Amino acid sequence: MARAFAAFYPAPNVASDPTRAPAANYIVNVSDKLTQDMGTLKVDHNIGNSDRISGRYSIIKAPQELSPVYPNAFADYRSGPRDHRIHNFVATWIHSFSATFLNEFRYNYATRRFINRSFGTDSGKNGELGVKGVSATDFAQMIATGQSNLGTVPVERIQDPILTHQWVNNLTWIRGNHSIKFGGEWRLSGNKDRFRQSTNGSFTFSDRATGSGMASMLLGHVTGATFNQTDDLVARTDYYGFFIQDDWKVTKNLTFNLGLRWEMDTPRWESETTARAALPLPPSTRCRARRA
C-alpha cells in the first residue's frame, strides 16, 4: 500500500545538493483561479408625503480553485475548489406620524454559502488502494519527514447556509429642545455546518527509526494516525438590543448627548444536530502504547 502511495510523488525536476538529503527538488509554478461577480439592485419609492420605502438586493459569487502542483490532483497537499456566495436583502420603511414624530423600520436578510474541498474528496482512492478504517471515498493524507505531504485535511467543509435575520425599529420624537430617539433590534444568526476534518485518515511517518521518513513509510512504520469525524451541526445564536437617547440642546453652543443601551448576545446553541454513522474500524485494529 505504501508503494502505491509513494508512486504519487512527482519525479524531481530540479537538481539538489548531492552531499545532502534531497530537498526542494521539484518546483512548479501554477496560477490559482478566482472569479468574482457582484450585482446590486436598489429601489426607492415615496408613498404620499408620510411614507417612504426602499429596498436593496445584492449578490456576490466568488468561486475559486487552488491549482494542484502534483500531476495527480487528488494527491496534492494544497489544492481544491472553493465556493463563496452571498445574498443580501435590506428593506426600509420610514413613516411620519407628524412633523415631530417619525418611525423607521428596517429588515435585513443575509445568507452565505462557503464550501472548501480538496481534489481528493470523493476520489474513491482509499477504497481503490485498500486503506481500511477510514472513508473509502476520499484520499488519505501521508506525512513523511523530509517529504512534502500527500493529500490534505480537512477533507471538506460545507457551511450552507450561514444565515442572518435582523429586525430594527427606531422612533424619533422631537419636543422643544429635545430630540429623543428610542428603539430596539433583534438579530437571529444560524450556521449549518458539515465539517469533515480527517475522515480520510492522516498518517505520520517520522525518520526516528530509519533515518528517513520515506523509508518508514515504505516499511509501514506509522508514528501516528488521526481519524476525526464530527456530526453535522445546525447552530444558532440571538442578539437583542434596546436603547434610548436624548440630544438635549441646552443653549445654541451647548448640547448634551445622553443615552442608555442594553445588549445581549446569547451563547451559540444547537438547534439541530444530525449524527452520521461512524465509519467502522476493522476488527484487527488495536491501540498500543510503549515506552521509548
Image: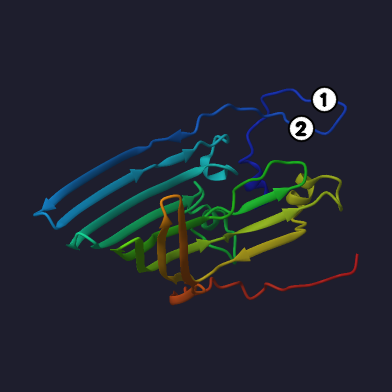
Answer with left or right where residue 205 lies relative to residue 248. right
Asked which quadrant contains residue 36, the reply is: top left
Pointer 1 residue: 17
Q: Amino acid at mark 2?
A: Ala
Q: Secondary structure at mark 1?
A: loop
Answer with left or right where residue 17 lies relative to residue 72. right
Q: Residues within 10 Å of mark 2 (few under 14, many from 20)?
A: some
Farthest top residue in view: 15
Check whether the beta carbons of the residues at disc 2 and disc 1 lie within 8 A of each other: yes
Q: Residue at x 70, y 23 (%)?
A: 14
Farthest front residue in view: 251
Q: Residues within 10 Å of mark 1 (few under 14, many from 20)?
A: few
Pointer 2 residue: 23
Q: Nearer the viewer, residue 231 or 223?
A: 231
Mark 2 to mark 1 CA distance (whole Å): 8 Å
Q: Position of residue 51 (x, y in %)?
A: 15, 57
Q: Residue at x 46, y 60 (%)?
A: 257
Answer with left or right where residue 99 lies relative to residue 130. left
Q: Position of residue 114 (x, y in %)?
A: 43, 53
Q: Secondary structure at mark 2?
A: loop
Q: Position of residue 206 (x, y in %)?
A: 80, 51
Asked which quadrant contains residue 274, the reply is: bottom left
Q: Nearer the viewer, residue 55 or 279?
A: 55
Q: Residue at x 17, y 54 (%)?
A: 52
Specify how the rendered protein is coloured: rainbow
Q: Amino acid at mark 1?
A: Asp
